[in-house]
Image (cartoon, helix red, strand yellow):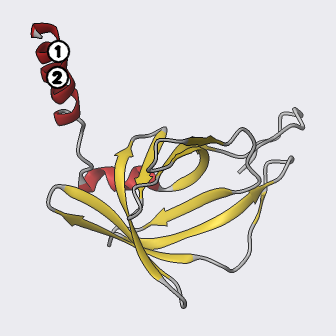
Amino acid sequence: MKNIFQILVFSLFFVGCQPKVQPADIAKINGYWEIEKVALADGEDKDYKINESYDFFEIGKNDEGIRKKVMPQLDGTFLVNDTYEQVKVRFEKDKAFLDYKTDYAKWSEEIITLTDKELVLKNTENTRYHYKKAGPINLNDDGKKTE
């Protein structure tokens, strides 16, 4: 019984020490993100080994910007279209949210984790989207710089 209590206290310590997303962290979201897995509310995980599209975020100093889907190409470029979602960052009760808006819908996702290399978003159905920072793919290996 004593061991169970120690494990419980230890677990609560780590949950309570999860770093909160601060306004200064929001700049880290800018760029290309590749989805690694989706953790469903029922505990099931769906892993993504290959992605045909990345999410591109561009958030300005006023905490507003866009998210759009882009398709990486083998030469290091991205195929893009004119479709995007307007995004506004909102802070509420020590939590950070991304509020999305299109002509057809509005929704929010909570930012659970945001570092230089990792992004975790949670929607209202308790589904967690785990992303890793991505960049252009360049299989040419010819020394050319990709953007």
Q: Residue at x 67, y 42 (%)?
A: 48
Q: Secondary structure at mark 1?
A: helix
Which residue is under mark 1? 4
Residue farthest along the bottom direction in this orientation: 103
- The amino acid pointed to by label 2 is Leu
Local packing at callout 1 (Cα closer than 10 Å; few below 14, some 14-19, many 20+) is few
**Which label number is shown at residue 56?**
none
- The amino acid pointed to by label 1 is Ile
Q: Residue at x 49, y 38 (%)?
A: 117
Residue 112: image x %, image y %? 34, 48
Quarter containing the N terminus: top left
Height in image: 19 above or below 110?
above
- Count all numbered tags in the image, as a single digit: 2
In depth, the one of 27 and 124 nearer the eye is 124
Local packing at callout 2 (Cα closer than 10 Å; few below 14, some 14-19, many 20+) is few
Which residue is under mark 2? 8
Residue 89: image x %, image y %? 33, 68
Q: Residue at x 46, y 47 (%)?
A: 42
In depth, the one of 19 and 23 nearer the eye is 19
Residue 145: image x %, image y %? 76, 42
For residue 66, side relative to residue 16 (left or right): right
Q: Secondary structure at mark 2?
A: helix
Residue 115 quadrant: top left
Residue 79: image x %, image y %? 79, 64
Query: Does the residue at mark 1 contact the one at mark 2 (Cβ under 8 Å)?
Result: yes
Q: Residue at x 32, y 73 (%)?
A: 62
Height in image: 28 above or below 3?
below
